[in-house]
Amino acid sequence: MKIPLTFISCDWGTTNIRLKVIETETLNVLANFASNAGVKTVYQEYLKETQIEQFDYFYNTLIDLIDNLPVAYQNNLIVISGMASSSIGMFEMDYADIPFSITGKGLHWKLFNNLTSSDVLLISGVRDVVDVMRGEEAQVIGLNTTITKYEKGILILPGTHSKHVYFDTNEIVGFKTYMTGELFELLSKNSILSNSVNEQQWSTVSEKAFLKGLHSGFRKELTAHLFTIRANDILNGTSKNEGFYFLSGLLIGDELSYIENDNEQFILFTCSPLLKLYEIALAELFPNQKHQILDDAIETNAVVKGHFSLLKMISKLN
C-alpha cells in the first residue's frame, strides 16, 4: 500500500466522530469536521434497518459525513480507530494482545478496498486479561514522537473512562480503566448530590475543597465521604462550588490510590480543565516521582500522529 499525499484521520468513538484531512508530509490539518454521530447512535439507527449489512450501513454513514469535507479530499483513504472496530461498529475485529510496541507493531488492522468511494484502514483495539480499550492505543502511539523515552512508568489519560497505561522500555505492557468521569457525571447530575454541587470559578477555596476530597479518596474512603457533601450543604452551609471540587477530588483520589508507588515517572495527557486537576493531584500525592505534563496542543494531534505512524508501518507490510 502506497502512502498517499493526504488521508482522512477518523477518530470514531462511542458518542462522537472526528474527521481530519491530513497532509502526510507535514501532518498539517487541511480540513476537519466533527459530529455527534458516534458509534452508539449509528448502531441504534442501523438496528432499524432490514435491507443492508452492518458494514455497509456504517460505511454509507461515514461517506455522508465526509461530504462535509472539501470535495478534493472526499475520496481519500480513511484511517479509523476507536469503537468502529467493535461489535456495535463498522466491522468487529479481535483485540490485539498486550504487550505491543510503541511503534504500533502488534496491533491488528484490516484494509477494505474496492469500495464505492474511499478505501478504509481499520485499526483494532487492545486487550489484556481483564480489560479492553479501543481508540486510546492510537493516542499512545502518536505520543511516541513527543515523549523522549517510554522507560518505565504510567501514562495517565483522564476522561469519562480514564486509562492508566503502563509502559516499560518502549513497550505498552498493561493498562487499567477507571470510570472516574462517568461516576462524576452520574453523581453530580443524577443522584441526591446534584443539588449540592455546582461548578464556579476556581479559587483558593476550591483548591482547599479539592485537596480535602483528594486525600479522602486516596485513603480509599470514597463511599464513606460521598454523603458528607449533602450533609455539609444542609448543616454547615458549605457552598455548592466546594461540593463540586470536593467530589472531583474524592473521585480522582480514589482513582490514583490504585497506583503502585514504584513507577519511575508519570506522563499526564489530557486537556483542560482535567489537566489542571490531575496535575495538582499528582504533585500532591506523588511528589517524588518525575512528572511530564502534555498540554492541550499535543492532545489534539496525538491521534493524527498515531494514524500516520500506523499508516507508515502498514504500508511497508502490504
Image (tube, rainbow, N blue to C red):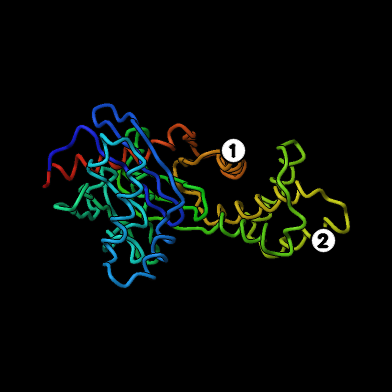
The image position of residue 19, as x and y in percent, is 36, 43
- Amino acid, disc 2: Ala
At x 67%, y 65%, the residue is 223
- Amino acid, disc 1: Lys
Q: In which quarter of the image is residue 26?
A: top left
In the image, 157: left or right of 281? left
Sequence-earlier tag: 2 or 1: 2
At x 19%, y 39%, the residue is 312
Between the C-alphas of marks 2 and 1, the distance is 28 Å
In the image, 74: left or right of 42? left
Q: Look at the image and tell me in which quarter the N terminus lies.
A: top left
At x 40%, y 58%, the residue is 39
How many marks can you see?
Answer: 2
At x 23%, y 52%, the residue is 106
Q: How crowded is mark 1: few (under 14 residues within 10 Å), some or many (20 or more)?
A: few
The image position of residue 228, as x and y in percent, is 77, 60
| Residue 15 higher or lower than 288, as above or below | below
| Residue 230 higher or lower than 289, as above or below | below
| Residue 178 higher or lower than 157, as above or below | below
Q: Name the residue under label 2.
A: 231
Residue 276: numbered disc: 1
The image position of residue 141, as x and y in percent, is 32, 43
